[in-house]
Image (cartoon, helix red, strand yellow):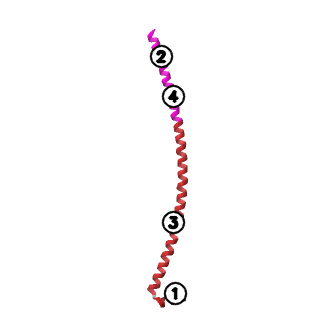
Amino acid sequence: MDTVGSMISTFGFPIVCCIFLAWYVLHSTDKYTKMIENLNAQSRADIMQINEQRASEVRELNNMHKEETNGLKDALNNIALALQQLSTKLDGKDGD
């Protein structure tokens, strides 16, 4: 406390207050900057994990869609074949 008193008597109260406030602002800014950096790093890690999960889900959905599309393709091919056979039979009966 003697140091503060001697600084006030040497430099004056306003200057000592300005120095203290400058130190306080610098200290607070550094503290909050570090805290924000830590939160940003954690948020980035969380976002990357969520993105990986979503990408995996999208790949799985794409594979499911591909299987469904292949099933529809096979069904359409079977229907086309059945229609062709039916047409052939009908053409054969018309000719008789």
Badge 3 amino acid: Ile
Mark before the other along the chain sequence, 4 or 2: 4
Mark before the other along the chain sequence, 1 or 2: 1
State the SS at label 4.
helix
Contact (CB < 8 A) between labels 1 and 3? no
State the SS at label 1.
helix
Mark before the other along the chain sequence, 1 or 4: 1
Residue 5 % position (x, y): 51, 89
Q: Which residue is mark 3?
A: 36
| Spatial CA span between label 3 and label 4 | 57 Å
The residue sitting at 44% across, 11% down in the picture is 94
Over which residues does the magenta segment extend?
67-96
Badge 4 amino acid: Ala
Q: Which residue is mark 4?
A: 75
Q: In the rendered view, would you say 73 is above or below 89?
A: below
10 Å crowding of disc 4: few (<14), some (14-19), many (20+): few
| Tag of residue 4 | 1
Contact (CB < 8 A) between labels 1 and 4? no
In the image, residue 94 lies in the stretch drawn in magenta: yes
State the SS at label 3.
helix
10 Å crowding of disc 1: few (<14), some (14-19), many (20+): few
Q: Which residue is mark 2?
A: 88
Residue 61 % position (x, y): 53, 42
Q: In the rendered view, would you say 49 is above or below 89?
A: below
Mark before the other along the chain sequence, 1 or 3: 1
Mark before the other along the chain sequence, 3 or 2: 3
